[in-house]
Amino acid sequence: MLRVDNLNVVFGHGEDSNQAVQDVSFQVDRGHSFGLVGESGSGKSTVLNCISGLLTNWDGTIVVDGIPLTHKRTISFYRQVQMVFQDPYGSLHPRHTVDATLKEPIAIHKLGNANQRVERVLSEVGLGPQFRFRYPHQLSGGQRQRVAVARALILEPEIVLLDEPTSALDVSIQAEVLNLLWEIRRERGLTYVLVSHDLAIVSHMCDTISVMKQGKTVEIINREQLRNGDITEDYTRQLLIAGRGYDRAAIDNFQDF
């Protein structure tokens, strides 16, 4: 469903240039979930922004459902690929109601039955009709992120890009949103690309995981390898230990990569 080959992204020019992504390659089968994991600044979100069309200064190959993408996307691309952003407090317009937020993509793509589509997708993400005419400041963080998920789903895409969709939420709410995303993927047969720094979330949500460091792919493993500790690279092993919580003795033995 999605293939990325030798993706490169450079910010800046000359001596001030920074290669944020270097020769990243992976593929995701239809209906599967793929994770990009690594510490902050490893290039995960940059890869997602290239796929979504938010960044255009990339080199390489991106293919969606057999069709190579150019830097300029057609409007039909955005019906096929949608994105859920990290911060539910910043991704929703503060002066738009939930209804207005969800109807905007329907109007842009000239789809009909707006009211029925809004009611159906709100129900799907676990929000009833009473939330339809509320503003973002009247919603909790988890409810806002459910609206963001609804906005991505309302165009009935085939691929959903998830940029750390639970990192801004309380731990008690994270599981609810993750379980919601899991059920929606299963019911709709969606393809997910999930960015996270949390290996526990990735191992729960994703079939295959790419570990990134300083813009490069360290290794690509599957869920079973991650859970069984069947890891070949020291950096991945160290990232796994760090994700288990604070351990002074373990940290003292960490290698500086």
Image (cartoon, rainbow, N blue to C red):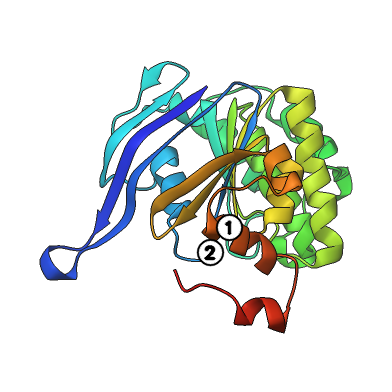
Residue 196 percent location from the top left of the image? 61, 55
Residue 88 appears in view: yes
In front: 4, or 256? Answer: 256
Marks 2,1: beta carbons within 8 A: no
Comparing 3 with 54, the one in front is 3
Q: CA distance from mark 2 to mark 1?
A: 23 Å
Tag 2: Cα neighbours inside 10 Å, few (<14), some, or many (≥20)?
some
Q: Nearer the viewer, residue 119 or 78?
A: 78
Measured from the top left, where is residue 154 in percent x and y? 66, 33
Count of all numbered marks drawn on residues in the image? 2
Q: On the picture, is 53 further left or further right than 151?
A: left
Query: Residue 34: percent from the left, percent from the top?
Result: 60, 37
- Label for residue 107? none
Please name the amino acid that badge 2 sits on.
Glu
Q: Nearer the viewer, mark 2 or mark 1?
A: 2
What is the x, y in percent for residue 170?
79, 68
Residue visible at 73% across and 38% down?
Answer: 224
Residue drawn at x 49%, y 27% is 2
What quarter of the picture does the C terminus occupy?
bottom left
Quarter of the rendering containing residue 124: top right
| Snapshot quadrant of residue 180 | top right
Q: Which residue corresponds to mark 1? A: 91
Residue kind at label 1, given as amino acid type: Ser
Q: Which residue carries the number 2 mark?
A: 39
